[in-house]
Each structure stands twice: as structure tokens, then as C-alpha cells.
Image: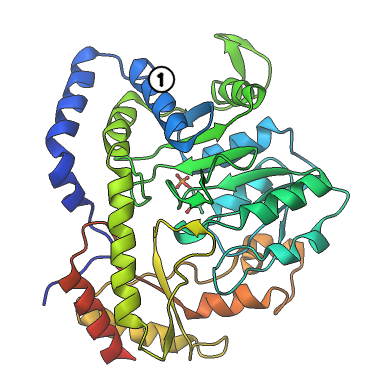
Amino acid sequence: MSNIPPLDLSRQYQLIGKEVEAAVGSILASGRYIGGSMVENFEREFANYIGVSHCVSCNSGTDALYLALRSLNIGAGDEVITTPFTFIATSETIAMVGATPVFVDIDPATFNIDVSQIAKAISSSTKAIIPVHLFGQPTDMTAIMEIAKQYNLFVIEDCAQATGAKWGEARVGSIGHIGCFSFFPTKNLGACGDGGAVTTGDEAIAAKIRMLKEHGSKARYYHEENGVNSRLDALQAAILQIKLQHLDTWNAQRHTAAEIYHQLLAPVSAITIPPATNGGTHVWNQYTIKLKAANNSEKDYREQIRQTLQAKGVSSMIYYPLPLHQQSVYKHLGYQPNSLPHSELVAHQVLSLPMFPEISQMEQEQVVYSLKDSL
Ligand SMILES: *Cc1c(COP(=O)(O)O)cnc(C)c1O
């Protein structure tokens, strides 16, 4: 029995290593490390891939969200609706621009925001909705865009975990007003360090984001606004350009691995497997099951299972143990226990199993065998 990590980037590197080393070597030799044609080419290719006219690269997915909110002039006194079951960056950036996150509970089946509960959270201060395509599963963008149109709101898609996913025939990041991507190494398209991008079909928004990410300047040393320094460097752009060519293949391999998990786990009555589709194409950044017996009062149950799995060489992860509305940073927002019950329960039930394009069927069998043994 071997050890099975949550993901293994070294296997991917074996495939593309030679090409990456040649590209990195040529950039190192060129002496041009910031900006330049590598970054411009990647932006163009990524915009093409997503199906939008503009891509602006930046330093991280967090910066992408921050720049998106700033470009729409969202700030103090404004409210932005999002999900409480996501990585902190989604709401952190809302607070960073001075606005207030308003959390709407999730659909416990898909882990994504429950679109049927959004309308009642809208107030006269609401400016935008940030749906998060969690674990690689697209949110119902048809419903989101209808609500946005009805109430005149902006939609910023948090696509950090869903690069390549589609809703209908459109890739996520091309449906809302702005799409935000992360190239953190664990994402479906990952750099060898930090990176991010914003996608949009709106030329004015793209120009504003480009200005904001370059210290609020269009012409160097002439500043129109307080901006930031947020760059994707040439080395990361070169690596991402190589990896982008493999993304669809890697996403298809994740899909195959998910189907194998589905088949092996469907008969296991103590767990709920994630739904395969909800009208979109899931790209399986995570394969996240729910432990049915876990509940709000039995916190140790899942931890015991995790430890037993670990002893058998199987690493599992918990995304996420505490929903955002219950984080101490948001105490002042005044959410009471049980105010968003689905996200609160699911946070005790979730367990993400090893998932990466190169995982073998034998490894998946070991994961499932070990899990059954641990339950
Ligand atoms: C990873 C992630 C981010 C932030 O991306 P970074 O590149 O790490 O800043 C934002 N939202 C979600 C849902 C993420 O998973």
C-alpha cells in the first residue's frame, strides 16, 4: 500500500518538465522578467480559452476579486451577496474595498449558493452578487443572471476552483460581468507560485482593472487613483501558457477519476457522493463527500475517520471546517447560530478525497477500501 496525497504536482511536472525548463531558461536568459510578450500572449490565449474579449492578469485570485470590485466602484455603504461556504478570499475582498458581505445559505447538494434564497437578501444597498463555482461545479448561472438583470446588479464569478468548467456551452468567467481566476498551484490551471486573472467582455472594465493594477496609472508616473501593484510575472505566464494547452485533457482525466469514485462509492450508504452534474460541466477541483452521521454536535466523528484514513496512507482534506458567517472576523455582522443552517451542517460533514488528473484507478480503489474500513 502506498501513500496517497491529496494531490501530486510532481507527476504533472514529469509530463511538461522539459518544455517548462526550456521556456523558463529562455526568459531567464532574456533579462526581461516583468511584463512583455509572454504575459501579453498568455492573456490573449486565456481570454480566447474562456471565450471573452479581455483578460487582465494579476498576482493572485484574491487580487482578481479585489480589482473586480474596485473596477465597479463598489465600496463603503454597499452590500455584496455571496456564499458563506467558500475560501475567505471571496468575502475578504468585499471587506477590503469597504463593502459588507451578505451571506446567503447554500444548496447542500451542490455546495453552491442557493439561488432561490438570493432575492430576499437584496436591499437598496446591494450592488453585486459573487457566485463561487465551488470544487469545480458551476453555479446555476441562468438563475443568477436573471436575478442580476431584475435587480440591476453586477455579477462577479469566483472561478478560482473552476477553470475550464462550463454552464451550458459557455465557460465560467464569460457569463457574469467579470470572471476571477486563481493560478495558485492547487487549482486546475496552476502556476509554480502565485498568479491570477480577470476576464470580461467589457472593454471599459478591462481598462479600469489594468489601470488599478498598475498603481492607478495609465501612463507611467501619472496616477488617477490609488491602485495596487499586482502582476503576473513573465516566468509564471510562460509556465501557464504551456499548461493551458493541457487543461482540457487534465479536466477530462479528473472527470474520469470522479466517475470511478462515483461507481465505487455509490453503494456506501454512510456517505453522500457529490452530484455529477447540474446543467453544467464540473471540473472536479475537489471530490467532496458528506459523512451522513456527522452533525453539529458530533465534531469528533469526522476527525476520527480522517485519522484512520491517514494511518492507512490516505490523505483527506476538509474544505471548509467553519462557514464564513461564523468566523470571528465577521462577529460584528451578527449572524446567529443556525442562521444559515445548510452551510453550518455541511461544514461538519464534508471530506475531500485525493483528486488530481494523474491519480490511478488502483489508488482510488485503495482510497475507497480504506474509507469503507474507517466508517
Ligand atoms: C483559491 C481561491 C481564491 C483565492 O485565490 P489566490 O490565488 O489563492 O489568492 C479565491 N476564491 C476561491 C473560491 C478559492 O478557492
Q: Nearer the viewer, residue 200 or 49?
A: 49
Q: In which quarter of the image is residue 4?
A: bottom left
Q: Relative to residue 44, is residue 153 drawn left or right?
A: right
Q: Is residue 283 shown above or below 51?
A: below
Q: Is residue 24 shown above or below 89?
A: above
Crowd around label 1: few <14 · some 14–19 · many ≥20 (10 Å): some
Q: Is residue 193 shown above or below 27?
A: below
Q: Relative to residue 222, is residue 302 drawn left or right?
A: left
Q: Give x and y (percent) for residue 279.
A: 54, 60
Q: Does the residue labelled 1 lie within 8 Å of ligand 1?
A: no
- Residue in the image at 21% along x and 63% along y: 359
Q: Give x and y (percent) for residue 300.
A: 44, 87
Residue 345 visible from this viewpoint: yes
Q: Nearer the viewer, residue 330 or 373?
A: 373
Q: Which of 168 and 109 is in front in this view?
A: 168
Q: Give x and y (percent) for residue 373.
A: 26, 91
Q: Give x and y (percent) for residue 356.
A: 28, 59
Residue 230 visible from this viewpoint: no
Element type at mark 1: helix
- Residue in the image at 45% along x and 60% along y: 135
The amino acid pointed to by label 1 is: Glu
Q: Which of 231 and 286 is in front in this view?
A: 286
Q: Relative to residue 172, is residue 44 drawn left or right?
A: left
- Find disc 1 in the rendering and name its residue: 40
The quadrant of the rendering that contains the N terminus is: bottom left
Q: Quadrant of residue 375?
A: bottom left
- Residue in the image at 61% along x and 38% along y: 178
